[in-house]
Each structure stands twice: as C-alpha cells, then as structure tokens.
Amino acid sequence: MSAILGGTFNPPHHGHITPALEVATHLGIKKLGLMPCKIAPHKPVQVEQKHRVNMVKVLCETDQRLYPELIELELPSPSYTVKTLKALKQRDKHTICFFIGADSLYTLHKWYVWETLLDYCHIVVMRRDDQQYSPPDHILPWLEAHTTTDVNTLHTAENGYVYLANSGLVTVSSTELRTKIQHEDDDNMQQWLSQPVLDYIRHHKLYKKK
C-alpha cells in the first residue's frame, strides 16, 4: 500500500509534509509519495515546473520515507486527479491511499467525475484536531456510504473507502512562505522549510520580486 500527497509544492514545506507523515505512520504506511500537480495555464505561476520538481526531489532526499511521484506531470493535459489515480493504479497494481485536506473534501463535488475517485484508491482526509468538521450536505450520503473508522479496512480492501484522520496543526501556507522569502524572513523560513529546499530557493533566487 502506498500513500500519495498531491500539491503544487510551491514551495514544499513542513506544513505539507509533517502532518502527512504522521498520518502515514498511524496507518502503517512506510512510504509517502509527494506528487507535484500541473498548474493550469491560466493561473499565475511563481516558479517553473522544473523548480517545483527539484525542490520535491531535494526534500525527499532528507527523509527515506519520502519519494517524488511525478506521474501527473508525465500524463497528457488536461490534468484530472481521477485520471492520475487511474494511471497510478494501472502502473503499480497495489492499494493507494490518496491524502487530501479537509478543505479539499468540502469541494470534492467540483472535481472531474469525483464519484469515481474511489474506484482507484482510498481517500484519507487530514483534518486538524481543532478544526470544525462540516462537509457540505450534498456529499454527506456519499461520505456515509464510504467512510470507515477501521485502519485495517484500508489494508484489506483494494479501494473504495474514506478515512478521516486527525493530524497536527499547520500554521503556515505556501503563500505566506513566499512572502517571507521575498522579505528574507530567515527565522520563519528555517522553521518551515528544510535546509536543502531553502538552499535551492536561495541558489536559484526563486520567489524574488521582479
């Protein structure tokens, strides 16, 4: 069984990784794949894709539990999570736990053919202990039909379940971090970024005002 955490990773920081590793350990999963997603052409891009990939790679070198999962970037556009998960399933032939935040769960009904996501994976929802849990009414029947509280079910069933996992407090966003980098707020940068990622950002002068 593998765990996958998707994101722009722009940049990858401890607020992404630490809670996900805690949840993976709780679930008995030894490896966590960090999967950079494609950024839509119409959206503003802070750094080139190659830099996002390289930051993920240098971060993964700091922890043997992490590995870069680049399959979404290799697939043809347009990019949809369900297509990525299907490709992962076809390639690896094992159970996938796809990690998302509670905020993503609340907008899941807006994803492309979202009802079929569980055909290819289990969904693990990471929520903070202090976070009010209030999914929208229109996904409640789907949640009630698929939610399990038994970790063993994730190991014995190939796909089809949602698991709600409490995770640590995250007090920074990528947007905040990019601002701190622009202002060279070293104390905060070192608190939230691994040293190799910070070194990479500085070497390539990423996120600087133009």
Image (tube, rainbow, N blue to C red):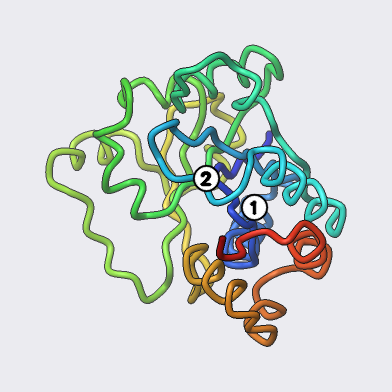
| Residue receiving disc 2 | 99
**Looking at the picture, does residue 81 appear above or below residue 37?**
above
Q: Nearer the viewer, residue 16 or 204?
A: 204
Quadrant containing the N terminus is: top right
Q: Position of residue 125 (x, y in %)?
A: 44, 50
Residue positioned most to the left: 137
Note whether 178 is above or below 121 in the view shown. Answer: below
Query: Horizontal and vertical percent for residue 76?
Result: 55, 14
Which residue type does callout 1 highlight?
Ala
**Nearest the eye: 156 or 176:** 176
The residue located at (63%, 12%) in the rendering is 90
Relative image position of residue 86 (x, y in whole percent): 53, 17
Whether residues under marks 2 and 1 lie with C-beta atoms below 8 angstroms apart, the answer is yes
The residue at 64%/57% (across/down) is: 12
- Which label sits in the foreground, 2 or 1? 2
- Residue drawn at x 34%, y 54% is 103
Three-letter code for the amino acid on which mark 2 is drawn: Phe
> Could you say which is closer to the camera, residue 118 or residue 191?
191
Residue 88 vertical position relative to residue 36 in the rendered view, above or below: above
Mark drawn on residue 166: none
Q: Nearer the viewer, residue 46 or 84?
A: 46
Please identify the quarter of the rendering in which residue 59 is found: bottom right
Mark 1 lies on a secondary structure that is helix
- First in residue order: circle 2 vs circle 1: 1
Q: Circle 1 is placed at which residue position?
A: 24
Distance in Å between CA atoms under marks 2 and 1: 9 Å
